[in-house]
Amino acid sequence: MNKTVLAIVGFLLVGGGVVYWNATQQASQGAGHAMVPPDTSALAEGAPIVDVDLPADLSDQAQIGKRAFDAKCAACHGTNAAGQNDVAPPLVHKIYEPSHHSDMAFILAAKNGVRAHHWNFGNMPAVKGLTDGDVKMIARYIRELQKENGIF
């Protein structure tokens, strides 16, 4: 065999190995890691989408974040980030865990808005009147809620 054929065969073997590895990694994650939004068809319009357990105590940063969240975000994302059916998604949801949506994703969403991509609520507009620091505190509040609810 010449070197070109050996290189092609080697490339195909490595490529096949990568494809196999990716497929087995996705299969091993199972349904528990699916980023599928819940069925909300039985909920009334504006009803909370998820039940949120509250932490006994919030850090000082999370308390600041809660105040900012209540002022700027809760009108759409609901009390304690539980979402509102037919309005906006819950942020206390596996879809928004740090490994999928970093804190920077929250900052960019508030600053620039977001095209709908996980839920069917339409695009989120930019939120006026929030600094990056405000959104960092909001993210801290959301992360503490998520942790209390087994998302982290």
Image: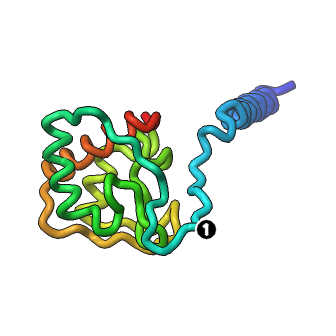
Quarter that holds the C terminus: top left
Please state which amino acid type lies under the numbered disc 1: Ala
Q: Residue furthest right?
A: 1
Residue at 28% x, 62% y: name it: 74
Tell me which colouring the rendered structure shows. rainbow
- Residue tagged by mark 1? 42
Q: Position of residue 43 (x, y in %)?
A: 55, 67
Residue at 39% x, 42% y: name it: 53
Q: Position of residue 19 (x, y in %)?
A: 72, 37
Quarter that holds the N terminus: top right
User: Is residue 127 shown above or below 10?
Assistant: below
Relative horizontal placement of residue 147, taking residue 93 as reference (left or right):
left
Q: Position of residue 122 (x, y in %)?
A: 45, 74
Whether residue 11 appears in this view of the structure is no
Q: Position of residue 106 (x, y in %)?
A: 30, 53
Residue at 61% x, 69% y: name it: 41
Find numbered disc 1 in the image and state the secondary structure of the residue it sits on: loop
Q: Nearer the viewer, residue 26 or 124?
A: 124
Relative horizontal placement of residue 93, taking residue 25 as reference (left or right):
left
Relative horizontal placement of residue 111, taking residue 45 as reference (left or right):
left
User: Is residue 114 shown above or below 81?
Assistant: below
Whether residue 127 appears in this view of the structure is yes
Residue at 72% x, 35% y: name it: 27
